[in-house]
Amino acid sequence: MNLKKKNAIVMNNFEKKYKSILLNAFKNGTKRNDRTKVGSKSLFNQSLSWNLNDGFPMITGRKIYQKVFNTEFDWFINGETNIKRFKDNNVKIWDAWADEEGELGKVYGYQMLNFNSQSINQLEAVKTSLRHNWDSRRHIISLWNPIQLDEMALPPCYLYFQFFVDHDSRLNMFVVQRSGDLFLGIPYDIALFSQILLHVAEECNYTAGKIDLQIVDAHVYNNQHVAVEKYLEEFTFIQPSYTYKDGNLKIYNYQHGPVISAPVAV
């Protein structure tokens, strides 16, 4: 692989770290068999951090689509289990896992708003806690529910959120992801997590601050190598600016590289 001329126009620190993890997994990751039978190279416990005061964290070396992460955020925040919203927006990221009726089972947002089918709304509980007990260490949303794993098309990859209010009334968030597809999934997960923090911060009258993400198994699938090499050789740009008001995310000046596609490992 030739990481020649296109290393950066302006390398933002966030994408520099992302590229470093991706390159390390591609070159040095442990070869692993997996559920998909595609195979992958994996790294253990990788960390990414970004601050929403620095811009919106969209990958710039290749084009990613706001419509995709906006749709997933709306689906998640409303506790939906069907892919109808994705179909309506021509977003195909969940097609391979849904049944004939478009159902995914008791995944992600279902566990957030109705944990274990017991009407436990973790999102509203966290908002209430942040409004009235900001210094609590229990501002937590957990999506991992062993009792209902067999009722899910796919167990949650991102499964733990914890919020922390600092002395400047900034709301920060820590995320644990058990499994991360570094090339296809993580760029959209990063944007999704950012919207979650912006949403909770606005609802609770805080300023959105920093996100720390821990990816326990960070991997590159064996059918993505050509795409990964191409992305690693591309220019990167500064993070785009954004506004967030009344739940509406607007992104400005998103400069990006080409569309680089890779197959999904199902």
Image (spheres, rainbow, N blue to C red):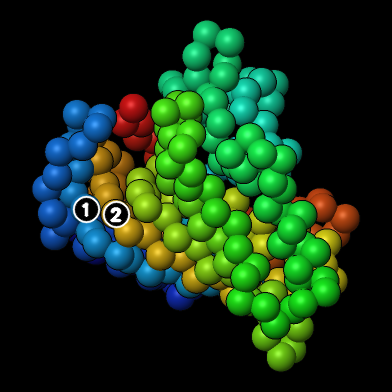
From the image, which quarter does the N terminus lie in?
bottom left
On the image, which quarter does residue 128 sit in? bottom right
* Amino acid at circle 2: Asp
Report the disc number at residue 42: 1
Residue 75: percent from left, percent from top = 67, 36
* Mark 1 element type: strand
Whether residue 93 sits left or right of residue 231 in the image: it is right
121 vs 25: above or below: above
Q: Circle 2 is placed at which residue position?
A: 217
From the image, which quarter does the C terminus lie in?
top left
Please say whether residue 70 is visible from this viewpoint.
no
Residue 168: percent from left, percent from top = 74, 89
Look at 43% across and 68% down and name the residue there.
48
Whether residue 34 sits left or right of residue 174 in the image: it is left
Residue 183: percent from left, percent from top = 36, 47
Look at 74% across and 78% down and name the residue there.
134
Camera-nearest residue between 172 and 14: 172
Number of numbered discs present?
2
Please say whether residue 151 is visible from this viewpoint.
yes
Q: Residues within 10 Å of mark 2 (few under 14, many from 20)?
A: some
